[in-house]
Amino acid sequence: MWRSADGYVAAVLRPSSFIIPAQPVLRDRPLKGDGWIHEVKFDGYRAQLHKAGDSAIIYSKNGREFSNRFPGILHALLSLPCKDAIIDAEVVALKDDGSADFRALLSGNTRRIICAPGASTC
């Protein structure tokens, strides 16, 4: 199911399908060396955002369709100034102080959600 810019949902052949993401590995301390990249672990949902022309879809980390759950992120994805994109992201609800609020994310209270890393509030 893909959602177009005008909100129409249709089953179509997708130009790209869900990609099984790499899974993080817990370590006692970060690995060292130039070949390693480290990132903050946010308390949210891992998501995969796909944009193809004027259609887009949001997947959970397990490949479930999440587009209806995060319409603000879907809208932001559709407004990106590119034709096609696949983005590995973390969807996080924030408290007023900027800390993560996973309970708000679970409850559907998505007044203030970001898609990290490097994204602005949707």
Image (tube, rainbow, N blue to C red):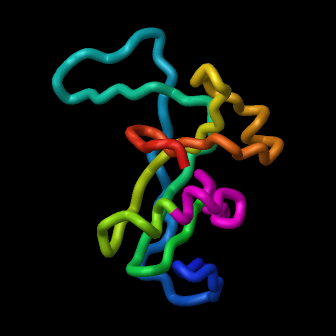
Q: Is residue 86 above or below residue 35?
A: below
Q: Residue furthest right?
A: 107
Of the 4 image quadrants, the one containing the N terminus is bottom right
Position of 45 compared to 23: left or right? Answer: right
The spot of residue 80 in percent (x, y) is 37, 64
User: Above or below — where is 121 with respect to 18?
Assistant: above
Which quadrant would residue 87 be assigned to in this image?
bottom left
Depth check, front residue: 75 or 61: 75
- Looking at the picture, tell me which residue is in the foreground, 24 or 109: 109
Residue at 67%, 27% (x, y): give it. 95
The answer to whether 12 is drawn above or below residue 108 in the figure is below
Q: Count every numbered label the image shows and give the total.
A: 0
Q: Name the residue located 55 percent from the left edge and 51 percent from the top edge.
A: 47
Question: Where does the image place residue 46, in percent across and percent down from the top left?
Answer: 57, 45
> Depth check: 94 or 44 in front?
94
Looking at the picture, how far across and down is residue 99, in whole percent? Answer: 61, 22
* Residue 117 lies within the magenta run: no
**Which residue is farthest left?**
34
Against 110, residue 14 (above or below) is below
Q: Give the residues drawn in magenta, as a range.
A: 60-75
Residue drawn 63% across and 88% down? 10
Residue at the image position 62 percent from the left and 55 percent from the top: 60
In the rendered image, residue 72 lying in the magenta stretch gets the answer: yes
